[in-house]
């Protein structure tokens, strides 16, 4: 029983580590800020989730024979906060480096909330070249 | 209606009790009593800030939605890993797509946007001024319309059933 648990935990840890590595590699490899945003919001979900599940099983079977529920709580809180981080980064990137004309328009008219009242992004008011900020 | 008065928000109470017990990490009657005290007082104190909270219905539907999202996270993580590792950058087709919303309540839209961000390959970027559309960025979408229809059919339809 303990051997099976150890093998299971090892497999989960290795898989989670691979996903974490791929997420970090994506951060380096992908071409611009918007696509790079995809890598960390994902590695956080499966990589960290896998490590936490492995920890849960270890405490349950091998260590103290009662589950450590903190891991479950951490997983839930990561799942709740990762989208907020992603949204904030995406919104600030849109605000700083994109013009409303470059985006698809909302179907019912109006504008995206980031470009409320047709404000020109501060970065574009100055001497910035939007292309240089947007990607490499 | 003393129960209604005591528990203005029964789901929040249950959630607070559960989270407190998870934080304590080992079952003891003393902490359960304290959890119940918190579960009663916090919703009472915060009730004025929730003038019209959303009505959710169908515990089974909610659980099956959560299960489906977790499964999708696992499957789609593999897809994104494959894109990152094996797809050259010049073949990558990132795209913005617009998702018109049937959902009305802000809470439901928040859940949908969170789901879109958690399922890999898509990040919800912005909401329109009037709150009737979401701007979503796709990592690799050769066919943007298919992604939009998939999100609408798979997630929004279920959320409409849960929240309305």
Image (tube, coloured by chain):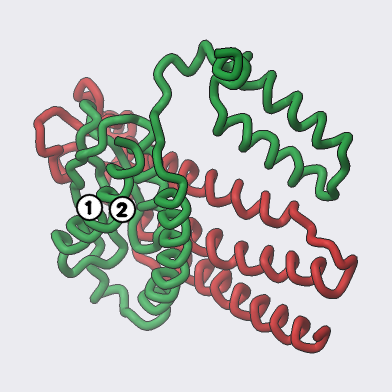
- For the point 83% across and 84% down, the residue is A2
- For the point 43% across and 43% down, the residue is A89
Dots 1 and 2 on the same chain: yes
- The residue under label 1 is B152
Is residue B40 among the parts visible in the rendering? yes
Q: Position of residue B102 (x, y in %)?
A: 20, 39
Q: Colour of chain A?
A: red
Q: Position of residue A56 (x, y in %)?
A: 74, 65
Q: Are marks 1 and 2 in contact (CB under 8 Å)?
A: yes
Quarter residue A107 falls in: top left
* Mark 1 Cα-neighbour bin, 10 Å: few <14, some 14–19, many ≥20: some
**Which chain does the green colour mark?**
B
- For the point 87% across and 38% down, the residue is B29
- The residue under label 2 is B155
Q: Quadrant of the N terminus of chain A?
A: bottom right
- For the point 59% across and 19% down, the residue is B3
Label 1 and label 2: CA atoms lie apart by: 6 Å
* Front position in the image: B104 or B114: B104
Q: Position of residue A133 (x, y in %)?
A: 34, 48
Is residue A129 among the parts visible in the rendering? no
Q: Quadrant of the C terminus of chain A?
A: bottom left
Whether B10 is drawn above or below B64: the answer is above
Mark 2 secondary-structure assignment: helix
């Amino acid at each position: 029983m303990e051997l099976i648990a150890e093998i299971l935990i090892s497999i989960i840890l290795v898989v989670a580590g691979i996903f974490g590595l791929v997420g970090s590699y994506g951060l380096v490899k992908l071409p611009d800020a918007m696509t790079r945003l995809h890598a960390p919001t994902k590695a956080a979900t499966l990589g960290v989730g896998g490590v936490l599940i492995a920890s849960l099983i270890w405490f349950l079977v091998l260590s103290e024979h009662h589950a450590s529920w903190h891991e479950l709580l951490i997983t839930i809180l990561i799942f709740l906060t990762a989208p907020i981080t992603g949204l904030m980064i995406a919104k600030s990137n849109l605000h700083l480096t994109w013009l409303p004309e470059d985006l698809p328009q909302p179907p019912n008219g109006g504008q995206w909330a980031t470009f409320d009242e047709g404000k020109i992004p501060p970065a574009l008011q100055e001497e910035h070249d939007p292309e240089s900020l947007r990607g490499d | 209606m003393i129960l209604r008065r005591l528990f203005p928000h029964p789901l929040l109470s249950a959630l607070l009790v559960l989270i407190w017990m998870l934080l304590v990490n080992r079952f003891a009657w003393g902490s359960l009593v304290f959890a119940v005290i918190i579960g009663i007082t916090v919703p009472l104190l915060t009730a004025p800030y929730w003038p019209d909270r959303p009505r959710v219905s169908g515990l089974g539907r909610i659980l099956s939605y959560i299960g489906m999202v977790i499964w999708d996270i696992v499957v789609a993580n593999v897809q994104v890993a494959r894109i990152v590792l094996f797809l050259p950058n010049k073949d990558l087709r990132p795209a913005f797509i617009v998702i018109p919303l049937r959902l009305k309540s802000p809470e439901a839209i928040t859940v949908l946007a969170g789901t879109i961000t958690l399922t890999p390959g898509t990040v919800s970027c912005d909401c329109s001024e009037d709150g009737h559309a979401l701007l979503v960025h796709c990592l690799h979408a050769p066919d943007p319309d298919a992604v939009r229809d998939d999100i609408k059919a798979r997630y929004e339809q279920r959320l409409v059933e849960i929240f309305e």
